[in-house]
Amino acid sequence: MLIKTPDLIKPSEITDRQLYLNRRKFIRAGANLGIAGALLNTLTISGALAATKLSTVKNRDYSTDEELTPYDAITSYNNFYEFGTHKSDPSENAGKFQPQPWSVVVDGECMKPGTYSYEDIINPHQLEERIYRLRCVEAWSMVIPWVGIALADVLKRFEPTSEAKYVAFTTVMRPEEMPGLRRRVLDWPYREGLRIDEAMHPLTLLTVGLYGEVLPNQNGAPIRLVVPWKYGFKSIKSIVRIEFTRKQPKTSWNMSAPQEYGFYSNVNPEVDHPRWSQRKERRIGDFLKRETLMFNGYGEQVASLYRGMDLRKHY
């Protein structure tokens, strides 16, 4: 059975994380007494709240030991334009989004195309926790304990052919549940892509949770990518299609503003955004800025992918 996720608490209602967890325990207890409906309305939480914890093993080989960004900050300060363009919009507007049941279409240059359910794709026994930095192009960053599976382990099941040079991804479109889609901020649906060797790199994570729990809607439920050496918009959310392609796929931000957003979008402090510098970043919760690291600090693992490339041209 697909694990269900709670609806979202507005930032103005967010308090202490322990209190948040205690509220959920109280609701579960109340459900047995037949009063869950009233409690859910009172606390602005709905849906089945049991079994939201994920069983994971921490992967220390890939995890940073930096201080974690608090859960409340991760879930209330987001870019997810399908729910609105302000940082608080996703947490405020994603409550009606239904992340279950879920299916993903897999097609293109592979031997096993088809429509796969969440359960077909995500093996709960393979889940692991990895603490990754997330760097956004607007010069802010977080450190997040993601839960997921190496994307390579999933893609290999579909048996991509030798013609598969890239992997394209598409986000779901549900205007009735995603109010941001009513504005033509981008050419919907949202699209992203990776070179096949980037997709198969062991750092690339198909993510289903954070802080040991299922992904909240505003963070990309139920399935998203995390590509830690690239800017955050490359880590596409709420994925409904995976396509193996011969040619470089179109990506939403590159289509919208090619002079500002390249296909690769690797974190590179030497290449400024046309409207601001990328040399420094502000970690959410910090007052002072810090130096931005090449490849977001993952250069030792991924620099070889781009050997010989002009990273100012292929930005």
Image: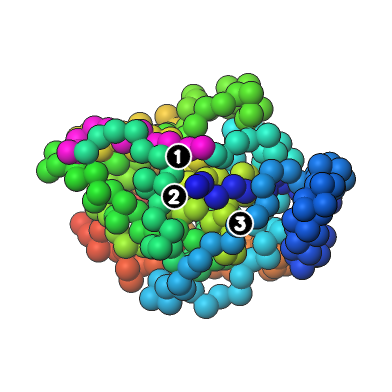
Label 1: how many residues lie within 10 Å, few (<14), some (14-19) or many (20+)? Answer: many
Q: Pointer 1 and pointer 2: residues touching (CB < 8 Å)?
A: yes
Q: Residue at x 77, y 68 (%)?
A: 18
Q: CA distance from mark 3 to mark 1?
A: 20 Å
Please provide the residue range marked out in magenta.
Answer: 101-111
At mark 2, the secondary structure is: strand
Give coordinates of residue 239: x percent, y percent.
45, 39
Question: Quick check: is 306 in the magenta stretch?
Answer: no
Q: CA distance from mark 1 to mark 2?
A: 8 Å
Q: Residue at x 61, y 70 (%)?
A: 68
The residue that mark 2 highlights is 225
Q: Which is more N-terminal, label 2 or label 1?
A: 2
Scheme of image coloration: rainbow
Q: Which mark is residue 239?
A: 1
The residue that mark 3 highlights is 52
Give coordinates of residue 196: x percent, y percent.
25, 48
Kind of residue at badge 2: Leu
- Which label sits in the foreground, 3 or 2? 3
Q: Is residue 116 left or right of residue 282?
A: left
Kind of residue at badge 1: Ile
Q: Is residue 13 visible?
A: yes
